Image (cartoon, rainbow, N blue to C red):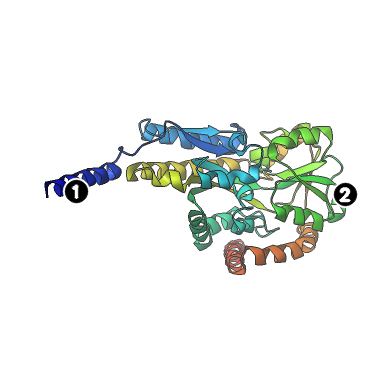
């Protein structure tokens, strides 16, 4: 009997130790995966999150951002697996890099779904579609904590100004390793090459590729792409959201109070990060000036010109819509349309 009581007491103490705040075995350092360099809204958003968490947990949780894809071992499409395996504890990651593992994330790369409309992006992320995507990520081992943003992706190259799909013929465009981008650029007659972001600047310098596509405020400007590419065309063909996330394994080992602190820090950093990425809005006068003053030749497309790209990429859109899941895509289209309808009602008034 005595033995039983002793056993029970030890068991209860063990349970208590597991549940008590601050008693869990914490790591000395939590690793955060970030593909880009510290400068620019993306890198700065990651650092802000780490700083907030350290301050508010009074140093109990130290998150170290590993910039420039250091944890990926040279392959950015591996990033989601790093979280699944707990190699990375946290990430601020592009949905493009995770889309190889989470097919629903290709939604954001469907050509011309969003028409440069940030309100529609926000509505989608905060609505049922966004919540569904976060549930899918949790099922696969990543706890999503907030939506950040890389931005709408614009195309740059060294060969010629691009006004029509014909202008893209034969141009070697570097794309991130997501197959939907290979399909999009092939449908336009370009010659796409999948390549890690870390290799792109030197590939553009050496002429291994002629161009690339990335958001202006987050990538083109901080990486000074005018040093390697002369022409930029604004076509806003895909949005690239970022996600602040934790590995489920890491998350489950944190106590409740720390999870709350981290969640709140991620939401704050995400909202700052998104604003910073949008501050220099893709085709705002300020960003156009920066590009022009650095010698880039800018092409802005009329709605009729954009339509030509849309028509050419429609088969890719349809093919990927069924791969992604037609219900999810239709729900996204509905959200985008309703935001646009609201806008045009306002304009008419
Ligand atoms: O590799 C890219 O183009 C980048 C930096 O935008 C992504 O991470 C998808």
Q: Where is residue 200 in the image (x, y as percent from the top left)?
A: 74, 37
Q: Position of residue 170 (x, y in %)?
A: 87, 49
Q: Where is residue 71 in the image (x, y as percent from the top left)?
A: 58, 36
Which secondary structure lies at badge 2?
loop
Q: What residue do we see at 57% from left, 35% from top?
A: 43
Q: What residue do we see at 52% from left, 58% from top?
A: 136
User: Which image quarter: residue 35?
Assistant: top right
Q: Dot 2 surroundings within 10 Å: few (below 14), some, or many (20 or more)?
A: some
Residue receiving disc 2:
170
- Which mark, residue 8? 1
Q: What residue do we see at 52% from left, 45% from top?
A: 85
Foreground disc of the pair 1, 2: 1
Distance, label 1 to label 2, CA atoms, is 74 Å
Specify whether 268 is left or right of 260.
right
User: Front-most of 343 and 78?
Assistant: 78
Q: Is residue 127 visible?
A: yes
Specify whether 188 is left or right of 133.
right
């Amino acid at each position: 009997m005595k033995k039983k009581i002793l056993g029970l007491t030890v068991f209860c103490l063990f349970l208590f130790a597991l549940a008590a705040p601050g008693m869990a075995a914490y790591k000395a350092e939590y690793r955060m995966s970030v593909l880009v360099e510290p400068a620019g809204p993306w890198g700065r958003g990651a650092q802000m999150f780490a700083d907030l968490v350290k301050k508010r947990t009074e140093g109990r949780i130290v998150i170290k951002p590993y910039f420039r894809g250091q944890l990926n071992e040279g392959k950015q499409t591996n990033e989601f697996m790093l979280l699944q395996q707990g190699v990375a504890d946290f990430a601020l990651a592009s949905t493009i890099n995770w889309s190889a593992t989470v097919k629903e994330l290709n939604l954001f790369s469907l050509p011309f779904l969003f028409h440069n409309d940030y309100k529609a992006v926000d509505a989608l992320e905060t609505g049922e579609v966004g919540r569904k995507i976060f549930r899918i990520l949790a099922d696969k081992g990543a706890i999503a904590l907030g939506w950040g943003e890389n931005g709408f992706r614009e195309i740059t190259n060294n060969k010629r100004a691009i006004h029509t799909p014909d202008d893209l013929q034969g141009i070697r465009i570097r794309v991130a390793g997501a197959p939907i981008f290979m399909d999009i650029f092939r449908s336009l007659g370009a010659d796409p090459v999948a390549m890690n972001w870390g290799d792109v600047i030197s590939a553009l310098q050496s002429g291994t590729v002629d161009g690339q596509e990335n958001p202006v405020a987050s990538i083109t400007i901080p990486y000074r792409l005018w040093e390697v590419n002369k022409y930029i065309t604004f076509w806003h063909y895909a949005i690239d959201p970022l996600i602040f996330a934790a590995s489920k394994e890491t998350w489950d080992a944190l106590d409740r109070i720390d999870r709350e602190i981290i969640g709140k820090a991620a939401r704050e950093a995400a909202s700052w990060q998104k604003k910073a990425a949008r501050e220099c809005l893709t085709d705002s006068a300020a960003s156009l000036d920066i590009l022009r003053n650095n010698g880039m030749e800018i092409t802005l497309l009329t709605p009729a010109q954009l339509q030509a790209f849309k028509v050419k990429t429609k088969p890719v859109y349809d093919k990927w819509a069924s791969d992604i899941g037609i219900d999810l895509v239709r729900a996204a289209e509905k959200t985008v349309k309703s935001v646009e309808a609201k806008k045009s009602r306002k304009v008419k008034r």
